Image (cartoon, helix red, strand yellow):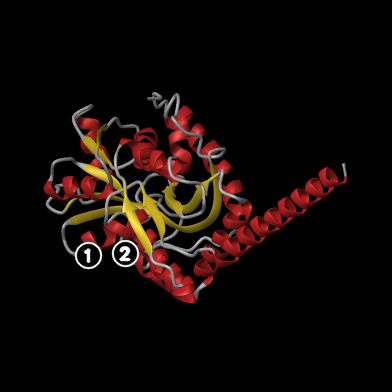
């Protein structure tokens, strides 16, 4: 009986030590996080505005933490491929989804059913940037203004088209259809860079594009910008009128980029990632980087990002209803 009591006591003590060691090990791993390379998954091809943000933040992330960041582009299927890749990876904080307004908000409004929920499946980390969309046509186009484009579309109902590299750009164009009273039809592409190539070559008549990716093509003479969908002119393209100035009352449209992780990621890792991303967002050089591209930083942590995301989802739902866009 004494021997039995002694055995149980020893076993209990050993289990306590093992448990303590396990907890200590877990705390040490958290303190060292990140202790290996991190992956940023992007739902668009290289050269897109989202990709540009991911690569900038990846560089700064490495400078702050000493850990390499791999930018992994997974374009196509309206972002579903990238989302599946992120949600299928271990929820340990080492796989970050750098998403856009399309994948994190617009898809909810445009699709009847999604294979993911951008709110419940992900934990927000930080906003990264916001940029007004540019309405662009081929450089050799006959249209030199929004009014000329609208007049041509009204004279040829159903004949003109637009290219879209994501659900967000599609809804911007559908909003344009509604405000301008025209009906251009959609030609979808894998990403914004492919859509811009199609516009530049004259394959499609027009498109809305992220200013961070399209402004250089405008300056390089490959595209012509007819309007910028912001409430004021943008220094990156100072001679381009706002959509409101160009005759589209109340028309503003922005793309934005934010970072999230799987909602199953432990809070300690999520909070540490959010802190790192927030530090990058607050850097003066980050503001300067985006200003040169015609964009702006969006300060705000996880709570602010979630509130903004929910507001965006409701906004695009209203636009889908107002513009009578058929859900896919």
Of the pair 195 and 83, the residue shown nearer to us: 83
100, above or below 281, in the image: above
Q: Residues within 10 Å of mark 1 (few under 14, many from 20)?
A: few
Residue 237, labelled with which disc?
2
Upstream in sequence: badge 2 or badge 1: 1
Give the residue at x 19% y 55%: 223
Q: Quadrant of the C terminus?
A: top left
Residue 167 appears in the rendering: no
Residue depicted at x 54% and y 57%: 126
In the rendered image, residue 209, in percent from the top left (x then y), is placed at 31, 50
Labelled pair 2, 1 in contact (Cβ < 8 Å): yes
Where's residue 282, x and y in %? 53, 70
Q: Is residue 163 left or right of residue 59?
A: left
> Going 43% across and 40% down the picture, which residue do you hit?
88
Task: Left or right? Give the position of 107 relative to 48.
Answer: right
Residue at 44% in and 59% down: 232
- Mark 1 — residue? 219
Task: Judge by depth and name the residue closer to the eye, 60 or 269.
Answer: 269
The CA span between labels 2 and 1 is 8 Å
Asked if residue 178 lies left or right of residue 22, the reply is: left
The reply to whether residue 326 is in sight is yes
């Amino acid at each position: 009986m004494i021997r039995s009591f002694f055995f149980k006591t020893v076993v209990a003590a050993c289990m306590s030590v093992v448990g303590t060691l396990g907890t200590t090990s877990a705390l040490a791993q958290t303190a060292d996080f990140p202790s290996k390379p991190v992956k940023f998954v992007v739902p668009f091809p290289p050269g897109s505005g989202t990709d540009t943000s991911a690569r900038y933040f990846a560089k700064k992330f490495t400078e702050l933490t000493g850990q390499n960041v791999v930018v992994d582009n997974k374009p196509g299927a309206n972002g579903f491929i990238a989302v599946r890749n992120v949600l299928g990876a271990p929820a340990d904080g080492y796989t970050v989804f750098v998403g856009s307004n399309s994948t994190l908000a617009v898809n909810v409004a445009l699709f009847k059913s999604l294979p993911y929920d951008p709110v419940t499946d992900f934990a927000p980390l930080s906003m990264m940037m916001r940029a007004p969309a540019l309405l662009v046509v081929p450089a050799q186009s006959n249209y030199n203004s929004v009014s000329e484009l609208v007049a041509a579309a009204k004279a040829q109902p159903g004949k003109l088209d637009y290219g879209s590299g994501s659900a967000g750009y599609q809804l911007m164009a559908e909003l344009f259809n509604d405000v301008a009273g025209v009906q251009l039809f959609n030609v979808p592409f894998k990403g914004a860079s492919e859509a811009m190539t199609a516009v530049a070559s004259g394959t499609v008549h027009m498109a809305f594009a992220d200013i961070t990716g399209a402004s250089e093509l405008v300056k390089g003479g490959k595209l012509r910008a007819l309007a910028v969908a912001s409430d004021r002119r943008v220094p990156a393209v100072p001679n381009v009128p706002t959509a409101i100035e160009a005759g589209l009352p109340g028309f503003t449209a922005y793309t934005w980029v934010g970072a999230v992780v799987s909602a199953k990621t432990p809070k300690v890792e999520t909070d540490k990632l959010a802190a790192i991303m927030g530090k990058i967002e607050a850097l003066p050089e980050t503001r300067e980087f985006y200003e040169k591209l015609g964009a702006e930083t969006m300060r705000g942590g996880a709570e602010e990002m979630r509130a903004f995301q929910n507001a965006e989802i409701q906004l695009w739902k209203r636009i889908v209803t107002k513009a009578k866009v058929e859900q896919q």
